[in-house]
Amino acid sequence: MGQNTYEGDIVIEGVRHIYKGNTVALDGIDLRIGKGLFGMLGPNGAGKSTLMRIICTLLVPTEGRVTVGGYDVVQERRTVRTLLGYLPQEFNAWRLHRVEEVLDTLASLSGLREKASRQERVFEILESVGLDDVADRKVKKLSGGMVRRLGVAQALIHEPRVLVVDEPTVGLDPEERLHFRQLMAKLGQDRIIVLSTHIVADLGSGCSDMALIDHGKVEFRGSPTELMNRAKGSVFEIRVSLNDEAEVTADLEVVSREEKGDEVLLRAVSSNGGLPAGAKPVDNPNLEEAYLAFMAARGCVEEANRKELSS
């Protein structure tokens, strides 16, 4: 029997999951996740969504054990669900309902029967996610960013201590992504948030702990700062002529380029571990560059290419 607390960590022990056809999605995951914003980073197909579904009691692992606040996600599923809020990759329901109606209905289903208390809770949540000004608007009239914030609101309506968010910003424009990162940083101050993404920028400044998952395994666990420190010496800048750019970049993963006359300034990571002649190492790589460098060192640079990270 789990401990009678909802403030405990998420503990993942030896979790493996194998789908039909002997496809191994997770291959021995061990993690402990505490309060704050925890980033689950990795390329598409790494196993992140499978792990999110296991944590949320939607999938039974082939092997291993997961507990939330001391409660087993398989044996004590109902209790775990009272502790969790979940925002899946797709949240497109309730399109013909008003925003306020959606949350009022979900609040009622979660056990808030008294109307005045329920309304107070609904508007408290709407204000916290920045949707109080569109409470009367139908869901189908919301922008993509607003729909994602409504998804967060529905996940928070029963005041969970754990929020699980899967690929939250796919399809959002840069401004909406920024607002979403700010919201996650604020919400992570007093609860556990597990945010799974293949877009490095989604983690934002509010993330102080993370895991990098690839091919169903945890390949890195630590702070974003630790990952960036590992990348020192692997990220560099080089200035080349436009005529020579194609040849120089054949073995590089280019992060950014800036044309200056007949030259181009490239910021890149090497896919073979060496630096080209004339390259100058970058003293302070950013998190996206650190991720690219990490994947390049493992021979997985194609899976971590910039198009995917910026999609």
Image (spheres, grey):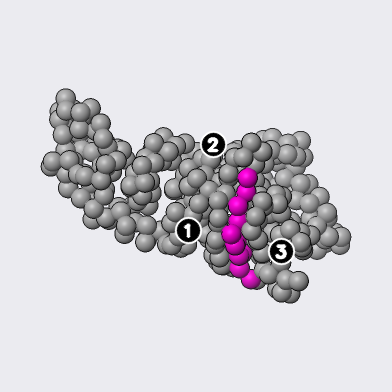
The earlier-in-sequence mark between 3 and 2 is 3
Q: Quadrant of the N terminus?
A: bottom right
Is residue 261 highlighted in magenta?
no
What amino acid is at disc 3? Answer: Asp
Measured as percent of width and height from the top left, residue 299 is found at 36, 42
Q: Bounds of the magenta span?
A: 8-18
Q: Is residue 311 left or right of residue 141?
A: left
Q: Amino acid at mark 1?
A: Met
Q: Residues within 10 Å of mark 2 (few under 14, many from 20)?
A: few
The x and y percentages for residue 240 are 16, 34
Q: Amino acid at mark 2?
A: Gly
As measured in the structure, the alpha-carbon distance from the residue carrying label 3 to the one carrying label 2 is 34 Å
Q: Earlier in the sequence, mark 1 or mark 3?
A: 3
In the foreground, 160 or 133? 160
Note whether 252 is above or below 229 in the view shown: above
Task: Give the labeled residue for mark 3.
Answer: 72
Q: Nearer the viewer, mark 1 or mark 3?
A: 3
Residue beneath the point at 48% across and 42% down? 43
For mark 2, give the secondary structure. loop
Q: Main secondary structure of the magenta part?
A: strand
Decide: is 21 above or below 9: above
Can you tell which mark lies on residue 210?
Answer: 1
Residue 230: % across, % down? 32, 57
